[in-house]
Amino acid sequence: MAEKLIHTISPVYDENSRVLILGSFPSPKSREYGFFYGHPQNRFWKVLAAVLEKPLPRTNEEKHAFLLENGIALWDVLHACEIEGASDASIAAPEPNDLSPILSAAKIRAVFTTGGTAAKLYKRHIQPAVGREAIPLPSTSPANCARSFESLCESYRVIQNYLED
């Protein structure tokens, strides 16, 4: 049975953020660790570090600083939903986050979504409100084992186009 959960991880952004990356909803491991992409097998942080040619951030504090230092805002599409474990496929009763605080504070040049579910949820629940499309990126979840690390890095390199002045 799916459980109704409320998102408890604050968005990461500041006035220098140039890209916004949105997942769907935090996994149980991310909620346990209190930060995004907390599962040790998730490749999100390794991919970003490789793409940006920066050292891999390890702690929540290092990850937070890494994002801000590189002009990246990070949050999720959903504020609340019913979900079974970490299964995006089980998401029901989705309630979107309000992106207006991020979009009004930062000069976001592009919005990206990680994974098919985040892309679909964004298109249905957020795009009509904010009037901008998101660029879909593949999931870095361990469940997406069909995508190699190299393939993920190749896909995520597109964010560099929006970070450079």
Image: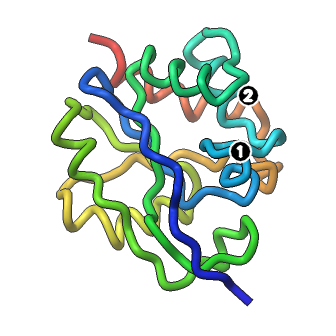
Reply above or below: 66 against 165. below
Reply above or below: 21 against 97. above
Quadrant housing residue 78: bottom left
Say which residue appears at 40% left-offset and 46% top-offset: 135
Q: Amino acid at mark 2?
A: Glu
Say which residue appears at 74% left-offset and 90% top-offset: 1
Question: Where is residue 61 drawn, in percent x and y?
Answer: 59, 24
> In terms of depth relative to the viewer, which is nearer, 131 or 85?
85
Q: Amino acid at mark 1?
A: Tyr
Disc 2 secondary structure class: helix
> In terms of depth relative to the viewer, which is nearer, 68 or 137?
68
Say which residue appears at 72% left-offset and 77% top-offset: 84
Question: Where is residue 98 drawn, in percent x and y?
Answer: 29, 59
Question: Where is residue 159 drawn, in percent x and y?
Answer: 44, 28
Q: Would residue 122 appear left or right of 88 to someone viewing this image?
A: left
Reply above or below: 90 against 50. below
Q: Name the mark on residue 53.
A: none
Tell me if residue 149 can be seen.
yes
Q: Which residue is denoted by mark 1 in the rendering? A: 33
Q: Would residue 131 appear left or right of 78 to someone viewing this image?
A: left
Question: Where is residue 97 drawn, in percent x and y?
Answer: 36, 62
> In terms of depth relative to the viewer, which is nearer, 34 or 50?
34
> In terms of depth relative to the viewer, which is nearer, 139 or 62?
62
Q: Name the mark on residue 150.
A: 2
Nearer the observer: mark 1 or 2; the answer is 1
For the C terminus, the image quarter is top left
The answer to whether the residues at label 1 and label 2 have Cβ atoms under 8 Å apart is no
How many marks can you see?
2
Disc 1 secondary structure class: helix
Quadrant housing residue 122: bottom left
Dot placed on the residue nearer the N-terminal end, 1 or 2: 1
